[in-house]
Image: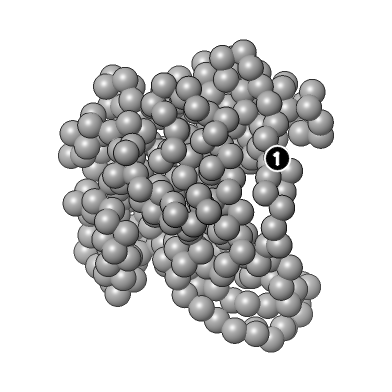
Amino acid sequence: MNKVVVIGSINVDSIMHIDNLPKPGETIKMNSFSKAGGGKGANQAVAAARSEAETSFIGRVGDDSNGKLMLKLLKEDHIDTQHITVVPKEDTGQSYILLQKSGQNSIIYQAGANSLVTAEDVDQAQEIIKQSDFIVTEFETPIPAAIAAFKVAHTAQKVTILNPAPAVKEIPKELLKLTDIITPNETESELISGIKITDEDSLKKSADFYHNLGISGVIITLGSKGSFVSLNGKSEQIPAFKVKAVDTTAAGDTFIGALASELNPNLSNIHDAIVYASKASSLTVQKLGAFPSIPKRESVLK
């Protein structure tokens, strides 16, 4: 059983179910409304935990009802929440999701307490990082905290996984040097590298861009086209599972959490781990919401 530490965001998702996005100036009717646990970091932690990784979380919530709800939901998935700080007089992070009938979504995000995650939070959680196999982070919480976490992991020779989302054009070189595996989707990769992904050649050039920054493992997710992996001089494209998408929320996060749960710390089974993560992600898009849609290991193995 892998030990996974996630440092990242915790949100409550408010989901507006609509037929199509409104045009500028247009008023449209909402078909229905729902709420669910979410946030990139929390989704990744839940995905890892439901794939039976021993999972711990570093982050922050507000002292509001949403914060209480999210702590309750994370504990229900047996995630260690002792390093989640409750911030007085602050809102818990929120996302407002416009979910179209096609399954595509548009997300408006309020950081709230997520913006207050610091390197000091990491300092207090050093021991769980040192005892982990993988440390995972993304960009919905401040980058200095990510750097601090990866420094501890790097010193302890633990594997670091960076999900560069939401994408930022300039990722600090200090963070990249501490990254073992980077997992952008094709849109994020283009913004970071400047290379538009159109074919196998552009995928290889994109991977080389990251390798030249010192990152040994590159996984570029391609939505319905699967994913591309480059590691130790070998690369391949791994196809996706063909399913009908109902809601793509948390699909990428599920992939990363499931990957961290399944991957050997020496990365020797990266192909099989990606296939497992792709299967988990394909199950996620067939249900509504973030937390409610993330599958358990037994469902992925069916």
| Residue 136 in the image: above or below residue 23 | above
Color encoding of the figure? one colour
Please report the residue visible at 68 percent of the width from the left and 62 percent of the height from the top.
Answer: 245
Q: Amino acid at mark 1?
A: Pro
Q: Nearer the viewer, residue 22 or 181?
A: 181
| Residue 9 in the image: above or below residue 180 | below
Q: Report the number of numbered marks.
A: 1
In the rendered structure, the answer to whether residue 64 lies left or right of residue 261 reads: left
In the rendered structure, the answer to whether residue 197 lies left or right of residue 283 reads: right
Please identify the quarter of the rendering in which residue 46 is found: bottom left
Circle 1 residue: 239
**Callout 1 crowding tier (Cα within 10 Å): few <14, some 14–19, many ≥20:** some
Q: Nearer the viewer, residue 292 or 35?
A: 292
Please report the residue visible at 65 percent of the width from the left and 85 percent of the height from the top.
Answer: 31
Q: Nearer the viewer, residue 199 or 243?
A: 243
Please say whether residue 242 is visible from this viewpoint.
yes
Please report the residue visible at 47 percent of the width from the left and 75 percent of the height from the top.
Answer: 35
| Residue 26 in the image: above or below residue 268 | below
Please say whether residue 183 is visible from this viewpoint.
no
Please report the residue visible at 53 percent of the width from the left and 29 percent of the height from the top.
Answer: 270
What is the x, y in percent for residue 289? 52, 67
What is the x, y in percent for residue 38? 44, 61
**Quadrant location of the N terminus?**
top left
In the rendered structure, the answer to whether residue 158 lies left or right of residue 36 reads: left
Which element is circle 1 on?
Answer: loop
| Residue 252 in the image: above or below residue 178 | below
Please identify the quarter of the rendering in which residue 156 is found: top left
What is the x, y in percent for residue 98? 62, 70
